[in-house]
Amino acid sequence: MKKNMGTADRLIRVIIAAIIAILYYTGTISGTVAIVLLIFAAIFVLTSLFHFCPLYLPLGLSTRKKKD
């Protein structure tokens, strides 16, 4: 897996995941919506940890800075 996520992209994903977790634990979201959002939050955290987003591959995207 070639890294294709930059620092800003990873930070935004972790922040979104944290917000979803807070909304869930405070009871703001519940039911099916909560489960779906928690799955997305887990995916965001995993992709951030591995610096790799599989959806970027077919689109040819990369938010990572190029090194000389």
Image: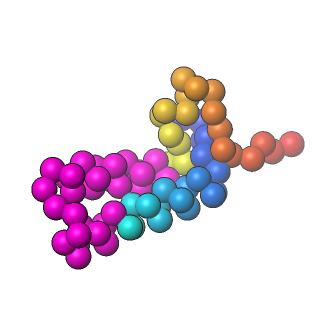
Q: Main secondary structure of the magenta part?
A: helix
Q: Residue 59, position in %: x, y?
A: 58, 26
In the rendered image, the quadrant that contains the N terminus is top right
Identify whether 25 is placed above or below 53: below
Q: Residue 22, position in %: x, y?
A: 31, 72
Q: Is residue 32 magenta?
A: yes
Residue at left offset 24%, top offset 48% = 36
Figure quadrant of residue 11: bottom right
Question: In the image, 13: left or right of 3?
Answer: left
Extreme front residue here?
A: 28
Question: In the image, 35: left or right of 17?
Answer: left
Q: Residue 47, position in %: x, y?
A: 46, 47
Extreme left residue here?
A: 31
Q: Residue 53, position in %: x, y?
A: 50, 40
Task: Give the camera-side residue of 4 and 13.
Answer: 13
In the rendered image, the quadrant that contains the C terminus is top right
Q: Which residues are magenta?
A: 20-49
Residue at left offset 55%, top offset 55% = 10
Identify whether 37 is placed above or below 18: above
